[in-house]
Image (spheres, rainbow, N blue to C red):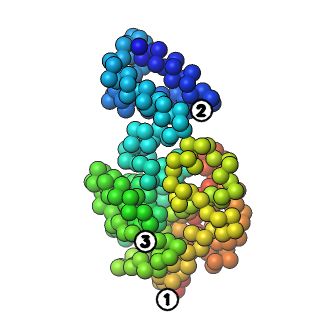
Amino acid sequence: MSIEEFYHLFYEDLQEVYQDSKELESLFFLLTTHVFKCDKTTIILKLSKKEKIEDYIYKKLIKKLWELKKNRPIQYIIGKTYFFGMDFLVNEKVFIPRPETEELVSWIIQDHKRNSENVQVFDLGTGSGCIGITLKKKLPKIRHIHAVDISPESLFIAKRNSKFHKEKIFLRKVDILQNLISLPIIKKYPVNIVVSNPPYVRISEKKLLHPNIFQYEPFQALFVPDEAPFIFYQKILSWIKKKFTGVLVCVYFEINQFLHLDFIEFMKKKGFRNLEIRRDFLGFFRMIRAIYYQKT
């Protein structure tokens, strides 16, 4: 079989699962560049020449095509994802970083790029470590990145990503709902960034998700009870109010777009003012920033 023939087979087999042609094209190049260990330009040249595929490569491609037909995310199939133009290792124990989270990180970078020397970051629910590692990479003067997660498997992946990118972050196993209060603040800096993309999808919204999300990605990283959609944020805000006095805290959250008005009221009731909410690239209200300061 030639690579051109595989290209047509790929589209025929997956067009019912992925109806967006641009998404299909992206999946094709993600898969083929991974298997052939080359860049997109090389794949395009192979297509134009109608190059034959070696048997062992063909078998790999067919196996991974079968996995895609079963709704398995391409990031889990190739074992990595791209975030801020960088590779991050992922597996089924880790939530796959999304473009919306890149926008949240970009907001933080823009806010602090001129003065990050006396800043520490708390990345709560770090998952793959992509937020903390990217911030350390893009704002190298930041003093400390504290990254926490309840999952030992996630922390293992985050540690591997930290080593791969040669960026030191402090990883700690913490259950946000049970013992976030136990997270020590070793030193208070003038500016503290608290960033989190916690579970925020209500169980009732599961039907709105693509099957490749709820079938494969970790349940505990996605869903919250319908009756308590802000449960993680509530714990984080309570922790901030108890632990930080006399210093500035910049809070950045990714939020449920269907609850953005309720979330603004929730933040205000918790004593957080100076709120700014932003839309993501799809036009949904997805990110919010609060500036918090409490006198000693």
Q: Where is residue 230 in the image (x, y as percent from the top left)?
A: 63, 68
The kind of secondary structure element at disc 2 is loop
Q: Where is residue 154 in the image (x, y as percent from the top left)?
A: 40, 58
**Residue at mark 1:** 296
Whether residue 114 can be seen here? no
The kind of secondary structure element at disc 1 is loop
Q: How far apart are marks 1 and 2 (CA)?
A: 55 Å
Say whether disc 1 or disc 2 marks the residue closer to the N-terminus. Answer: 2
- Name the residue: 38% across, 22% down: 58
The amino acid type found where label 3 is placed reads Val
The amino acid type found where label 1 is placed reads Thr
**Residue at mark 3:** 174
Say whether disc 3 or disc 1 marks the residue closer to the N-terminus. Answer: 3
Please tell me whether mark 1 or mark 2 is closer to you in this view. 2
Whether residue 258 can be seen here? yes
- Name the residue: 61% across, 43% down: 210
Left/right placement of residue 295 relative to residue 273 reads: left
